């Protein structure tokens, strides 16, 4: 009963936006690696699994997010545009990870259990070579109870923590030792009722304007117009209670299972970052007649029209690749541009206090894989959390 498995993979994650129907790549993470696993049964229900993982990660941003404002002559990631958190995550790194897990499995069925339990405890150590050093511990437990009339009740809990061993962060600069890409995140699909990475520590960047009294004020009340950076945490927990409601024999044969559920959880523990605010003067990203990317200071902004008056001094060329025109720069010595308006940042959500949602779900074991629709109502949330009443997933088991 000894098992052996090997995975070789390449995973690409890209974030992009569209400017005047032109695709603009912003964030890219490419992971290439392999994992080897060995499983040995200790008893009838208890199995030990050892694994080794080697990952090579490359994280990059588009050239539009670079300038030499901080290091003259050497373009680097510009935190005023990209945010400090993406800038901190950039680079190439090699992760060499050893993992050990203990799994106790008494379920009567892996795909649709009706009784039994599944408990696993796993630990990972990154640092046997490579450039990443941390220890990570995770616990998962689930229990299924058959009830009269073919109802099925289930309870599950999970949690984890991660600790860095390289001490590369700086408390004075608000940089955490655990890298952005190694932290825990919580939200859809794990926590129904919340958006993807909608729970936990985050930095909100709010655009500012000047009111009638000459004071700075937030000009956009719609959160969709804010920049929302979920930065994850070093600790998390999650719990779920669910009651599966039986239908007729026809629905059962089709694999259709409605349910009611309650989800609770939180993620927290990241070092408080140093937020930034830009009032006036602020910067503008522009391009000259040859398409070279430049940065200029702004002398004035007309809040009623949004038009800018750039200076003609301190122009620094940092890259090429023209973008569509911006009316803010019409008649100036640059033909293209993108303004960076005044803004303020706020750090929220770094608390262990629970988030709670209840709802109803519809699960179908379709020929294309597990298909699930959920409608949820959030009963408890914290400042900064983003909620989402309707979720749809294909291929996700709970």
Image (tube, grey):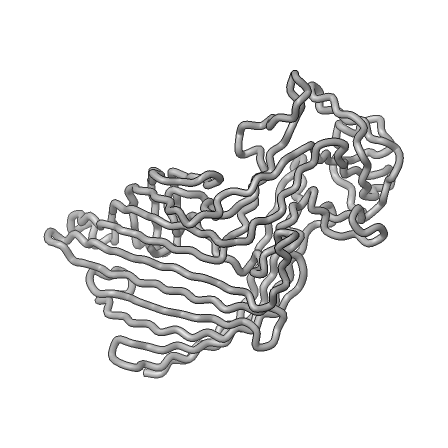
Question: As drawn, which residue projects farthest toward the top?
Answer: 212
Is residue 101 among the parts visible in the rendering? yes
Q: How many marks?
A: 0
User: For this view, does 356 lie left or right of residue 179?
Assistant: left
Q: Quadrant of the N terminus?
A: bottom left
Residue 110 against residue 150 in the figure, above or below: below
**Which residue does the image show at 47% across and 52% down from the upper left?**
268
Q: Quadrant of residue 94?
A: bottom right
Residue 279 against residue 358 in the figure, above or below: above
- Residue 333, image x, y percentages: 87, 32
Q: Quadrant of residue 152?
A: bottom left
Question: As drawn, which residue projects farthest toward the front?
Answer: 172
**Which residue does the image show at 40% across and 40% down from the upper left?**
381
Residue 332 against residue 363 in the figure, above or below: above
- Residue 165, image x, y percentages: 56, 68
**Which residue does the image show at 54% across and 34% down from the upper left?**
224
- Residue 58, image x, y percentages: 64, 62
Q: Nearer the viewer, residue 198 or 15?
A: 198
User: For this view, does 156 lie left or right of residue 122?
Assistant: left
- Residue 247, image x, y percentages: 18, 47
Q: Quadrant of residue 177?
A: bottom right
Q: Nearer the viewer, residue 12 or 339?
A: 339
Is residue 28 among the parts visible in the rendering? no
**Which residue does the image show at 84% across and 50% down from the upper left?**
72
Question: As drawn, which residue projects farthest toward the left?
Answer: 148
Q: Quadrant of the C terminus?
A: bottom left
User: For this view, does 219 lie left or right of residue 374?
Assistant: right
Question: As drawn, which residue projects farthest toward the right?
Answer: 313
């Amino acid at each position: 009963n000894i098992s052996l498995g090997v995975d070789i993979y390449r995973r690409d994650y890209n974030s992009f936006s569209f400017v005047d129907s032109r695709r603009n790549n912003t964030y890219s993470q490419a992971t290439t690696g392999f994992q080897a696993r060995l499983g040995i049964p200790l008893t009838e229900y208890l199995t030990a699994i050892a694994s080794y993982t080697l990952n090579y990660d490359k994280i990059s941003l588009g050239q539009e997010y670079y300038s030499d404002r901080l290091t003259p002559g050497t373009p680097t990631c510009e935190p005023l545009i990209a945010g400090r958190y993406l800038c901190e995550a950039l680079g190439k790194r090699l992760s060499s990870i050893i993992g050990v897990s203990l799994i106790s499995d008494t379920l009567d069925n892996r795909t649709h259990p009706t009784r039994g339990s599944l408990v696993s405890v796993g630990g990972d150590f990154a640092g046997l070579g490579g450039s990443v050093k941390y220890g990570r511990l995770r616990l998962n437990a689930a229990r299924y109870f058959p009830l009269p009339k073919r109802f099925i009740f289930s309870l599950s809990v999970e949690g984890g923590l991660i600790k860095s061993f390289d001490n590369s962060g700086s408390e004075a600069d608000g940089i955490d030792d655990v890298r952005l890409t190694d932290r825990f995140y919580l939200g859809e699909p794990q926590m129904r009722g919340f958006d993807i990475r909608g729970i936990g520590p985050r930095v909100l960047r709010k655009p500012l304007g000047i009111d009638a009294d000459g004071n700075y004020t937030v000009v956009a009340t719609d959160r969709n117009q804010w920049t929302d950076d979920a930065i994850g945490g070093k600790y998390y927990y999650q719990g779920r209670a669910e009651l599966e409601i039986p239908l007729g024999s026809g629905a059962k044969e089709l694999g259709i299972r409605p349910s009611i559920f309650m989800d609770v959880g939180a993620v927290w523990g990241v070092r408080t970052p140093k937020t930034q605010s830009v009032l006036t003067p602020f910067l503008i990203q522009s391009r000259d007649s040859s398409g070279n990317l430049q940065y200029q200071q702004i002398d004035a902004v007309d809040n009623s029209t949004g038009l800018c008056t750039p200076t003609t001094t301190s122009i620094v060329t940092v890259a090429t690749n023209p973008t569509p025109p911006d009316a803010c720069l019409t008649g100036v010595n640059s033909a293209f541009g993108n303004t960076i308006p005044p803004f303020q940042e706020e750090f929220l959500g770094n608390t262990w206090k629970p988030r709670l949602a209840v709802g109803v779900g519809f699960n179908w074991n379709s020929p294309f894989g597990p298909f699930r629709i959920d409608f949820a109502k959030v009963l408890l949330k914290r400042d900064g959390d983003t909620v989402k009443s309707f979720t749809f997933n294909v291929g996700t088991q709970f």
